[in-house]
Image (tube, coloured by chain):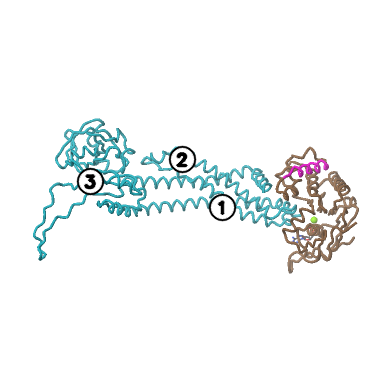
Amino acid sequence: MLYALKIATRYLTASKAQTALLVLGVAVGVFIFIFMSALIGGLAEFILSRTVGDISHVTITAEDRDPAILISPEGHVLAVTERGRARTATLAEAATYLPLIEAVPGVVAVSPQITGAGFLTRGAQVAQVSVTGLQPGRESAILDLDGYMTQGSVRLGSGLIVLGETLADDLSLRLGQTLRLQSSTGVSAVLTLSGIYTTGNGMIDASSTYVSLSTARTLFALPQGVTRIEIKLDDLNVADATARRIRALTGLNAVPRTDGAEQLMEALNAQAQTGYFLKSFALITIVIGVASALLLSTYRRRPEIGIMRAMGARRGFVIFVFVTQGALIGLMGGVSGAALGYMALLPFPPRDAFEAGTLPMDITQGSYGLAITLTVIGAILASILPARAAARVDPVTAIGQ
Amino acid sequence: MTALLEVSDLVKTFGTGEAETRVLRGLSLTLKVGEMAALLGPSGSGKSTLLTILGTLMKPTAGSHVMLGVDLVAADDAALTTFRNLHIGFVFQFHNLLPDFTALENVVFPTAVRAGRETPAARARGRELLTRMGLETRVDFPSANLSGGQKQRVAVARPLMNRPDLVLADEPTGNLDRESALQVMDLIAEINRDEGTTFLISTHDEKIASLCRRQIVVKDGVITG
Ligand SMILES: Nc1ncnc2c1ncn2[C@@H]1O[C@H](COP(=O)(O)OP(=O)(O)O)[C@@H](O)[C@H]1O
Ligand SMILES: [Mg+2]
C-alpha cells in the first residue's frame, strides 16, 4: 500500500517536532536496551573469564598407589609396604597422553605442569612461594598470563621466572634482576625476573611464580614426567562427562572441577534474568509511548479520518496508515537508538582488554539487530489499538456538520 | 430523465426514550440523473441528516434507499465504502480538506485511495479540475495556506475526480462571502451542465437556492415542496 505509506509519512513529517520527540523517546528506550545487553553480556564474559575462565576444568593428578599389603590366609595383615619417601607421584608417561587428551571433543587447551613449593630469596628478603613449571608455548593455556602481564614477557625460557606484582613489590624486585629460588626438595637455582603480572587474584599475585617446565624439572628433581595436567574445556557444563571420558581413554585420574560452578552459573543466570527484566521494561516504555502518541494523533485527526472514509477509504486503509506510522517510528527510533548505543559503547575497552574498576561493556553484545526488530514489532503492536480506534471513527460525527 | 436515486418513507430518530428525537418522519424523494437541486429548510430541519443518509454515511431507522438499482440499506460497510468511492462525492461546510496535503493531493485522493497510488492519469485529471476551478496557480500549494474561497473550490473539484453520479453538498457556501459563494455555485452549475453530474445542495440561503433548477424544501422531517 504505497499510498497509505505516503499518507503515513506525511502525517509524521507534518508535525516534525512531535515526531522527533517521539522518535527520541523510542531511541532512548532502545539505547537502554542495548546498553543493558552490552553490560550484562560483558559482565558475564568478565566474570567467567576471571573465574572459571582462568582455572582448569579437568585436572589430572598422579595417583598415590595404595600401599601393598600382605594378608595371611586367616585374614590378618602381615605386612604393609612403607610409602615411598619421594614426595611426588608423577605422571611418567604424560607426554604420550597429551595428543590423546587434546583430541577429546570439547577440550580447548591442555597444560602439563610440574608444581611444588619453594623459597624465593633476594638479598636478605625471603618469601614462600608456589612454583609452577609450564611448558613454553603453553604459558597462557589455563590462566591467561599473557593477558595479565604488566611488565616484561610471559615467554618462559630456561633460567627465567615470572611472578605477580604484589610479590615483586614485597621483595622490591625489578625486571631483569636475579633472585634465588630454593625448592622444597632442596635444589636451588638462580633465575632472572623476566615478567610481572597482575591478575587481580590476591593469592596468585602475592605467592605464585612460574618457571619453564625444564627449570621445574631441575628444581624438583624430576627427570621425566609431570605432576599435573590441567585441561580447559569450551563448556564447563560437560566437565563431568569429559573427565569420565579422559579417565576411560587414558586410565589417568582425571577430576572435573565443577564445585562452585553451579552457583556461578545460577548467579550469571539471575543476572541475565535481571537484564531481561530491564530490557522488557525498556520495550514496554516504548510501546506505551508510541501507543499514547498515536492515540492522541488519531483523536486530533478525527475529522480528516472521517473525510477520508467518506471519500471511500476502507477501514483497512485507515488501519494501515496508522500501523505504518507506528512501524516508521519504531524503525527510526530503533535505528537511531542502536546507532547512539553503538557510539556510546565505542569508548569502552574491547572484551579482551576489560580493566578492573571499569564497566565491562561488550560492544559486540549490544544485540543491535534484536533491539531494532523488537522495537519495530513493539511499535507496530502499539499502533494497533490507535489504528483500530481510527478505523472506527464515524464519519458523520467526525465531520461534525 | 431516468431516476438516479429513490428514498421512500425515510425515518431517522436519534436517541431513545425521553431523549428520542425524530428528525426524519417518513420522507420520500426521487432524484433524476443530471438534476441540480437545492435542499432548503431552516436550521435543524434535517437537511444534513438527509444528505448523510443519501451519502451512505449513516443508515435510516426505517425506510428504503435505492440508488442505481442498489439497495443501500442492506449493504455492509465495505460495500458502501466502495459504492461511495465510485458513485458519490461530498462537499462539506467545515473540515473539508486534508490540511497536510497540497491542493492537488487533496483532489486526487478519491482515485488514489482506490488505485493504491497517485497515478499520472489521476494527477492530470486533478490538475485539469483545479484549472477549471481557476486554481491553476495553486495546484501545489499546501491546502492549509489557501484562502477560504480557494479551499472550497478545491473541495468542489475533489468529489468530481471519480466522475461520480451524485455530488452531495452540505451548505458548501455557508462559510463564504457572497462573491466566493457565487463563484462556487457557478462552478457547480458548469460541471452539472458539462458532465451531467447530479447535484443536491443544501442551503438555507434563498439566493443560493434560486441558482438551482429545482428546489426541495424540508420541514418537520418531510418534503413540503
Ligand atoms: N447524532 C445526532 N444525535 C442527536 N440528535 C441529532 C444528531 N444529528 C442531528 N441531530 C438533530 O437532528 C436535527 C436535525 O439536524 P440536521 O440534520 O443537522 O439539520 P440541518 O442540517 O437542517 O440544520 C437537529 O435537531 C439535531 O439536533
Ligand atoms: Mg446542517
Give chain B's shade.
brown
| N-term mark: 2 or 1 | 1
The part of the image, by quadrant, that contains residue B130 is top right
Mark 3, secondary structure of its residue: loop
- Residue contact between numbered discs 3 and 1, judged by CB atoms under 8 Å: no
Q: Position of residue B67 (x, y in %)?
A: 82, 59
In this picture, residue A154 sits left or right of residue A377 = left
| N-term mark: 3 or 1 | 3
Residue type beneath disc 2: Leu
Residue type beneath disc 3: Glu
For the residues labelled 2 and 1, the Cα–Cα distance comes to: 27 Å
User: Depth check: A214 or B2 in front?
Assistant: A214
Task: Give the magenta-colored segment's residue range.
Answer: B118-133
Q: Which chain contains the residue that carries disc 2?
A: A
Please name the residue that numbered disc 2 is placed on.
A345
Please name the residue that numbered disc 3 is placed on.
A93
